[in-house]
Amino acid sequence: MYKGFTLIELMLVMVVVAVVVAIAAPNLRSVVVTQRVKTVATDLHTDLTLARSEAIKRNAGVDVVPVNTANWAQGWSVRFGATVLSSQQAYPEVTLTGPAASVSYLGTGRMSGTAAVSFFIKATSYPAVTARCIYVEPSGRPAVRADRDGDSSDGVCD
């Protein structure tokens, strides 16, 4: 007797795999976009923490500057004067709104202004994906929060 698979068995397995892939593919796209929103939040939080740490270490001002203030998702950089300490490239499929100007840290690690700063991160084409917010207190400490109300159109993490 021969050991192995018949052509019919092989075709049946291929059909089952194709059906599973067809069902899973749309959900997989949502998972990818959800992970991208989380990645943007993590990267921005990391760069804000870097800027604060560098400001304290150097005892001088350090800025986080967006490429485009209308959409921070186009990228940003952490700068000490003219020196770029870190830079971030654009993120597709994500909208990131933040302050209209750069975020500046003093040599003490505190924000240069007296008001807190917030960023709102959402998926551009997937409103069901949970949005993220980053709040920067006047003390300079950033914190990431998930949008608990599930409404990414309001621009607020409640």
Image (cartoon, rainbow, N blue to C red):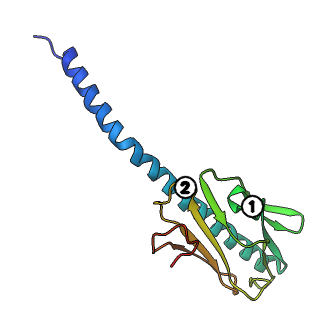
Write the residue at 80% across / 83% down: 112
Q: Residues within 10 Å of mark 1 (few under 14, many from 20)?
A: many
Crowding at mark 2 (Cα within 10 Å: few <14, some 14-19, many 20+):
some
Q: Would residue 50 be seen by someone viewing this image from the given angle?
A: yes
- Residue lying furthest bottom: 114
Mark 2 secondary-structure assignment: helix
**Which amino acid type is shown beneath numbered disc 2?**
Arg
Q: Earlier in the sequence, mark 2 or mark 1?
A: 2
Q: Is residue 18 above or below residue 87?
A: above
Q: Nearer the viewer, residue 49 or 138?
A: 138
66 over 133 or under it: above or below: above
Q: Quadrant of residue 83?
A: bottom right
Q: Is residue 151 left or right of residue 119?
A: left
x then y, percent, for residue 100: 77, 71
Task: Check disc 2 and report the residue beneath it.
Answer: 36
Quadrant location, the N terminus: top left
Mark 1 sits on what residue? 76
In the rendered image of this protein, does residue 82 appear above or below residue 23? below
